[in-house]
Image (tube, rainbow, N blue to C red):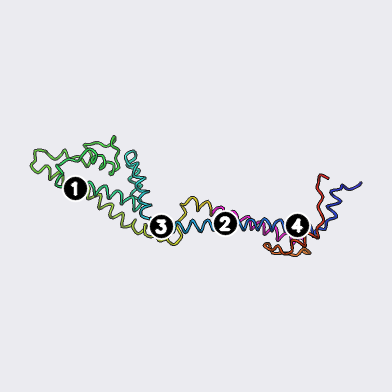
Amino acid sequence: MPMSTTATLAGAIPASNITRRTIRQVDLAIKLERERLAMLQERADTKRAWLIRRADLVWDADHRDRAENLASKIKSQPGRVVARLTTTYHGCLFLMHRWSYLHQKVVSKKFKGELSKHDHMTAHSLLGFPADEWDNEESELNTDAISRDDPDWEIAVRKQLRELFMRELRRLTEIMKVLDLENKEAQAEAKAGEFFDTDPFLNKTEREIASCERRIRVLEKERLLATKENPEVEAVPADSSASTGSADAEEAPVASPLL
């Protein structure tokens, strides 16, 4: 039974020539992947250098902005927001500034025994209570127990509120002693080129780098396998193109399956 034209021509091509072509195709793929890898690594290095510079110059401004952005939701979810703010140094700093503001109000000579409606709501939010949920009778800000007929009423109200505000300031001060160390360590790591796990661009680039490295390893294994299966084919380094021209001259054209 006669052989097909395709089979006849393919069988006429030495196996070594086919292997050379396979190796050159793999070499080209490896070359392209290495070029892409170099580009990705340069991109990651540039981004990392930028993050290091940013950590050195605007670390406090960045984290203060994050705390204030979270604090902007305090009226709708005071309990949750205050709890989250208390877990970071800059979040505690935000809370301390607000409590200090209220404290200055009640110790001021202008204080006449009553907080403004705005200050009253601010204090309740800082304590973690929504305006529509706290019971004024049970509130620590309630001063109704102090009789207005008492000649020292204003002094007593000032004392009650001052003690409340000072208690919160002392509590935050103790928390910040721990968080201050944590914040400084995080900034030091950022300046050293670490602690960038939360940067989306860098994370994406590093995933692409890892994927590119995996493809290179797979291609290098394919190349090694091709040379092992045909020992007569010289194992040319993957980045070498010196013998490409001579190898092409030795190859016979491969017939198209359509012929």
Considering only order in the chain, which callout, 3 or 4, is on the residue closer to the N terminus?
4
| Res 249 → quadrant | bottom right
Q: Which residues are magenta?
A: 206-230
Could you tell which of marks 3 and 1 lies nearer the N-terminus? 3
Say which amino acid is labelled 4.
Answer: Arg
Residue type indicated by callout 1: Arg
Picture disc at residue 90 = none
Instruction: Give whichever of discs 1 and 2 has the lower sequence position.
Output: 2
Mark 4 to mark 1: distance in Å? 85 Å
**Between disc 2 and disc 3, whose residue precedes?**
2
Pointer 1 residue: 162
Q: Residues within 10 Å of mark 4 (few under 14, many from 20)?
A: some
CA distance for labels 1 and 2? 60 Å
Say the numbered circle drawn on residue 21.
4
Residue carrying label 3: 55
**In the rendered structure, which disc, 4 or 2, sits on the residue that comes first in sequence?**
4
Q: Position of residue 12 (x, y in %)?
A: 85, 55
Q: Residue at x 81, y 44 (%)?
A: 258
Q: Give the quadrant of the C terminus.
A: top right
Q: CA distance from mark 2 to mark 3?
A: 24 Å
Q: At label 3, which amino acid type do we have? A: Ala
Q: Is residue 193 above or below residue 257?
A: below
Residue 11, image x, y percentages? 84, 54
Q: Position of residue 54 (x, y in %)?
A: 42, 56
CA gap, disc 4 and disc 2: 27 Å
Q: CA gap, disc 4 to disc 3?
A: 51 Å
Q: Which mark is residue 39?
A: 2
- Callout 2 secondary element: helix
Q: Is residue 70 left or right of residue 36?
A: left
